[in-house]
Image (cartoon, rainbow, N blue to C red):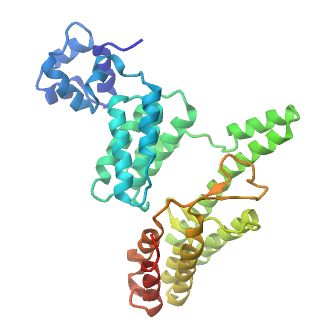
Amino acid sequence: MPLSIGQTIKKLRKERKLTQEELAEQLNVTSQAISKWENETGMPDISQIVPLASVFGVSTDVLFGTFGTSDEEEARKILDDAYGFKIGNTESLRRRYDMLQDGLRRFPNHGWLLMNSIQTGLGLIYPENNHYDKIQGNEIYQECIRQANVLIANSKNTNDILNARYIMVLLHSAYGNKEEAWEHAKQFLWRTDFTAENMYAWIARAETNYTAEAYHLQNDFGCRLTATLDNIIQLGTAYRNMKKYDDALKMYFSVFSLMEIVYGEEKLMPPVQNTDSGDVYVLIAQTYLETGDKDKALDWLEKLADYDTKIRCRLQKGVCVDTPFLRDAKNPVYCITDGENKERLLKKLNEAKFESIENEKRFIALINRANAMDG
C-alpha cells in the first residue's frame, strides 16, 4: 500500500537524519508545520512540494505515494542504460553515476539502484581507484553514505546489506572516519566460510548431485580466491608500511605463486591487481625503490609494461578459463574494459612514487612505450 504524503515526508526526513526543526529551517516554515504534515493533521501547500522534493533529492511524484514502490521494468531500463556504454575514464564513470542518481530521484528506495549507485560511487571516491574523482569525491562520498544507510535500513537482502557495510568500512576508513568504520565492521560474522554457495554444495552432496556440488564449490572458491589474493596484497602493503621489506616482497611474490597454481595451464594469465592497494607489479617496484634498488624497481615496471602491452590488450573481449578450479563457475571469465589500456598504464607509471626515477633512460623508454599503445 502506497505511503501517504505525511508518512513519506517523515520517512525521507529520518533517512536523511534531519530533525523537524532542521527541515523546517530549510523550507522556511515552522517545525509545528512539519509535525502537522507528518501526523497528517495538515498538508503542505502546493508551493512547498518542489522545495520539499529538492531538499530530499527526489522527484515530486515520490512525495505523492510512490516511495517504497517501483516499476521494475523501468528500474531495469535505468540500470541497462547506465551500464550500456563503455567506461574508459573518470568522466564516463561519472556519467554512469549521474544516470543512476536520476533513477534514484524517481525510485529512492529501490534496492538494485541503490546498490549499483554505491558500487559505482566507490569507483569515483576511493582514493586508490583508477577513476578517483578528486574534485567531487567528498560530495559523492557523503551521498554514498546516505544511500548505504537507506539500503541497510530497508533491504531484506542480507547480501546487499553486508555489501553496503563493506563499502562503508572502506570509505569511512579512507576518509578518516574510523569510529563509523568500526561500527560497520562489527556487524560481520567472525567466520567467512558460511556462504550460500558452500551451503548449496552440502545440499547437492546429500542429493548425490555431484555436478551441482562441484559447480557451487567452484563459485565459492572463486570468491575465496579473490579474498585471499586481496588479503595477501594488503598484508604485503602493511609490511611495506612497517618497512619490513623482505616480508612485503615475500607476500607480493606469493601472489604470483598462487596464481600459477590456479591458472598455470591457461594461455593467458589474468591481471594481478587489488582494487584497494593497486597493481602488484607496481607495489613490488615501489618496495624495491624504497630500499634504494632502482634497477630492480625498473625491472618490475618493465614486467608491468610487458603484461599491459602484450597480454592485457588480448583480454579485451574476455577469456574463458579451463582450470578445474573455476571451469564451470558462474563467471569463469576475466577481461579488461575496452579502451583503457593506455590510460591505465600511463597512470601507473606517472604516480608520484616514481618521481625519483622519471629521468632514468629505462623509465623514459617505458613512458614512450605506453604512449605508443593503441587505446
Residue at 45% across, 46% down: 83
Q: Is residue 17 above or below residue 195?
A: above
Q: Is residue 308 left or right of residue 96?
A: right
Q: Is residue 132 above or below residue 203?
A: below
Give the image quarter of residue 203: top right
Farthest top residue in view: 41
Q: Is residue 224 above or below residue 311?
A: above
Note whether residue 349 is visible.
yes
Farthest right residue in view: 208
Residue at 71% across, 69% down: 267
Residue at 75% across, 35% down: 200
- Where's residue 149, x and y in %? 41, 35
Note whether residue 125 is visible.
no
For the residue pair 178 and 160, the one nearer the viewer reads as: 160
- Where's residue 366, x and y in %? 47, 84
Give the image quarter of residue 151: top left
Q: Is residue 142 left or right of residue 23?
A: right
User: Looking at the figure, which quarter contains the N terminus?
Assistant: top left
Residue at 47% across, 32% down: 111
Farthest left residue in view: 28
- Where's residue 140, x and y in %? 33, 47
How many circles with numbers are drawn on the protein? 0
User: Looking at the figure, which quarter contains the C terminus?
Assistant: bottom left
- Where's residue 157, x and y in %? 55, 30
